[in-house]
Image: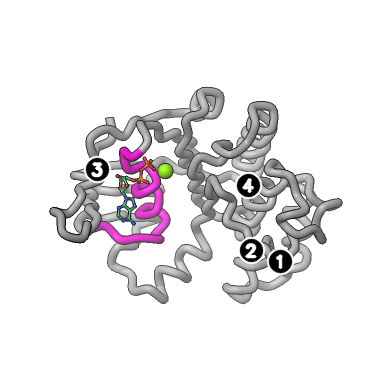
C-alpha cells in the first residue's frame, strides 16, 4: 500500500455561520501502481480530498500515510520537500505561469527543488508529451490541449510516485480529452506511477482500475 488516509475530517470556516463540513470521516487507500477515479457531484469535496492527499491543505482530523510517512505531521518545509519529490499534481485550469514559456513552466518544480540535469529532464518530458515544437511558446500562444500537456509535463518531470489529477479533461473538447486521456495512461504506465484522478469523464473513469464515489463526506 503506497497511501493510506484514515478518518479524514475537513470543514471550512464560514463568516457568521457554522463551519461547513465537507469531509466527515473519509477513508481512502491506494496500492502502488493502481489507477483510481474519484467521482461525485459538484461540491461533494473531491477537490478538497485531492488537496489533502497532495499536502496542499491540511485536514482538521485524520492521518495520511504515504510510503509510511504521515504527511499531516510534517511542518511546512518538510511537507514542501516531500511533495516536490513524490507527488505530481494536475489541475483542471492548468495553473501555468503566464509569463513563462512551456519549457520554463515545466522546469519550475526542478529549479525549486534544486534538481540536477534539469535540461535533460525537461527535454525528455517535452518529447514524451509531444511538446518539443512548442517549448518556447507562452501559455497564451498554446491551445487548451497543449496547455494541459504542459501541465502534465510539469507534474511528471519530477517522476512522482503518485500523480493526482483534478478533472484533467474538464476544460477540453471531447476529441482533445480523448487524446489527453490516452497520453496520461501511457505516461502513468511508462513512468510506473500510481494515479488518482477526479473526473466526470466516463471514458477516463473506465480506463481506471477502480472507481470510488464521494457522497455526503465519505467515499463509497
Ligand atoms: N477554501 C474554501 N473555503 C470555504 N469553502 C470551500 C473552500 N473550498 C471549497 N469549499 C466548499 O467546500 C465544498 C466542497 O468543495 P470542493 O472540494 O471544491 O468540491 P468538488 O471538487 O467536489 O466540486 C463546496 O461546498 C465548496 O463551496
Ligand atoms: Mg473540484
Left or right: residue 163 versus residue 119 is left
Specify the quadrant that holds the C terminus.
top left
Name which quarter of the figure residue 67 lies in: bottom left
Instruction: Name the residue tied to disc 2.
Output: 97
Instruction: Name the residue tied to disc 1.
Output: 100
* In contact (CB < 8 Å): disc 4 and disc 3: no
- What is the x, y in percent for residue 60? 21, 58
Q: Cα distance, mark 2 to mark 1?
A: 6 Å
Q: Cα distance, mark 4 to mark 1?
A: 26 Å
* In contact (CB < 8 Å): disc 2 and disc 1: yes
Q: What segment is highlighted magenta in the picture?
A: 43-59
| In the image, residue 11 above or below residue 41 | below
How packed is label 1: few (under 14 Cα within 10 Å), some, or many (20 or more)? some
Q: Cα distance, mark 4 to mark 3?
A: 29 Å
Instruction: Name the residue tied to disc 4.
Output: 191
On whether ligand 2 comes within 8 Å of the CB at mark 4, the answer is no
Amino acid at each position: 500500500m503506497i497511501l493510506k488516509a484514515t478518518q479524514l475530517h475537513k470543514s471550512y470556516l464560514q463568516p457568521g455561520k457554522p463551519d461547513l463540513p465537507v469531509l466527515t470521516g473519509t477513508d481512502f487507500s491506494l496500492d502502488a501502481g493502481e489507477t483510481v477515479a474519484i467521482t461525485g457531484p459538484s461540491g461533494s469535496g473531491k477537490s478538497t480530498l485531492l488537496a489533502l492527499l497532495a499536502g496542499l491543505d491540511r485536514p482538521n482530523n485524520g492521518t495520511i500515510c504515504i510510503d509510511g510517512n504521515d504527511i499531516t505531521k510534517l511542518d511546512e518545509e518538510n511537507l514542501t520537500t516531500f511533495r516536490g519529490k513524490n507527488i505530481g499534481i494536475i489541475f483542471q485550469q492548468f495553473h501555468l505561469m503566464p509569463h513563462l514559456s512551456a519549457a520554463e513552466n515545466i522546469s519550475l518544480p526542478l529549479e525549486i527543488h534544486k534538481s540536477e540535469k534539469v535540461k535533460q529532464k525537461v527535454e525528455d518530458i517535452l518529447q514524451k508529451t509531444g511538446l518539443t515544437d512548442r517549448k518556447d511558446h507562452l501559455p497564451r500562444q498554446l491551445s487548451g490541449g497543449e496547455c494541459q500537456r504542459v501541465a502534465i509535463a510539469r507534474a511528471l518531470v519530477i517522476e512522482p510516485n503518485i500523480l493526482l489529477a483534478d478533472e484533467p479533461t474538464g476544460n477540453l473538447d471531447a476529441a482533445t480529452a480523448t487524446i489527453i486521456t490516452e497520453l496520461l495512461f501511457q505516461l502513468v504506465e511508462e513512468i510506473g506511477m500510481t494515479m488518482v484522478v477526479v473526473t466526470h469523464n466516463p471514458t477516463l473513469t473506465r480506463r481506471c482500475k477502480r472507481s470510488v464515489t464521494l457522497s455526503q463526506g465519505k467515499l463509497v
